[in-house]
Image (cartoon, rainbow, N blue to C red):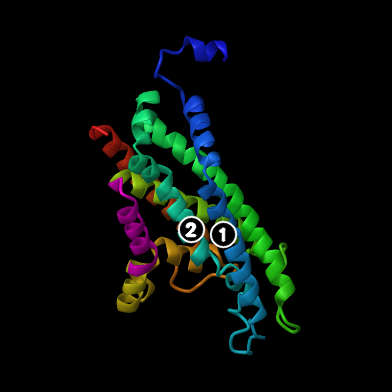
Amino acid sequence: MSAVETSLPAGHHRFGHAAHMEWIKLSSLRSTLWALLATVAGMIAIGVVTMANTKVPGPDHADTFDPVNNVLAGIALGQMIVGVLGVLVITGEYSSGAIRSAFAAVPNRPLLLAAKGAVLGAVTLAVGEVVTFATFLAGRLALTDGVPRPGLGDPGVLRALLLSGAYLALVGLIGLAFGAIVRHTALAIGLLVGVLYVVPAVLAGLTGVTVAKFFPTMIAANSLAVSKPVAGCLSPWCGFGVLCFYVAVVLGIGGRLLVRRDV
């Protein structure tokens, strides 16, 4: 134990100590490994199948044809797995009662939530970037002859891959925030499903992309995971900024509620 650690009063830890504790907990859970492996396998499989079934674009669609958007179709699955993992990072402790020990070790609850978010975000960001690039490279090989084959040097491709990987980490943080807000696994997952799938689908059916374009899944599909702009949708960096704003807001709400509650 370092001199800094021994100089701290019992039960009072700094961010680094809290983050180390959260890393031990996250890395020791088998569900973490299985969730991340399922994300990688599912996204690569969907990307390869989608690219294998991608046809040569007709002359009317040549200008808007975007194989990058096709190969990253697996984000629709990956976001759900990562989001549920984010929920479980905190609701799992509530269901087991381990959250009391965590609060006893780190009484500063917003600091504890920040540590959870930093560890979860770092892990899911690393996995997200790896899986998006792996999916892209594998999907390129599955394209049939005659279909334009995208490259990392093509305009917008590298940006699409990087932002799509970061998107998975942001969804994980949204799941963590929902878990902190409601403290119940099923309810938090229900909120996550509603925000990611149900509400934007309903809004898209009622208003087109006018309102739905501001929801995470629509931002990922039409702003982040594209190498060519989609008419009527947010620009890639604007969409990414909106997502970061969402994460800051819901994590802020979660931190405030953790302080106000007895447990």
Give percent across and percent down for residue 131. Answer: 63, 58
Which stretch did the figure color magenta?
182-198
Give percent across and percent down for residue 66. Answer: 61, 75
N-term mark: 1 or 2 = 1
**Rendered image quadrant of residue 134:** bottom right
Q: Which residue is mark 1?
A: 38
Q: Residue at x 59, y 56 (%)?
A: 37
In the rendered structure, find residue 81 and report the number of the disc placed on it. Answer: 2
Which three-letter amino acid code belongs to the residue tagged 1?
Ala
Q: Is residue 77 visible?
A: yes
In contact (CB < 8 Å): disc 1 and disc 2: yes
Vertical relation: 108 (above or below) 234:
above
The kind of secondary structure element at disc 2 is: helix
Q: Residue at x 52, y 61 (%)?
A: 78
Q: Tell me if residue 153 is in the magenta stretch.
A: no
Going by the image, does 122 lie left or right of 213? right
* Residue 21 vs residue 217, the one in the foreground: 21
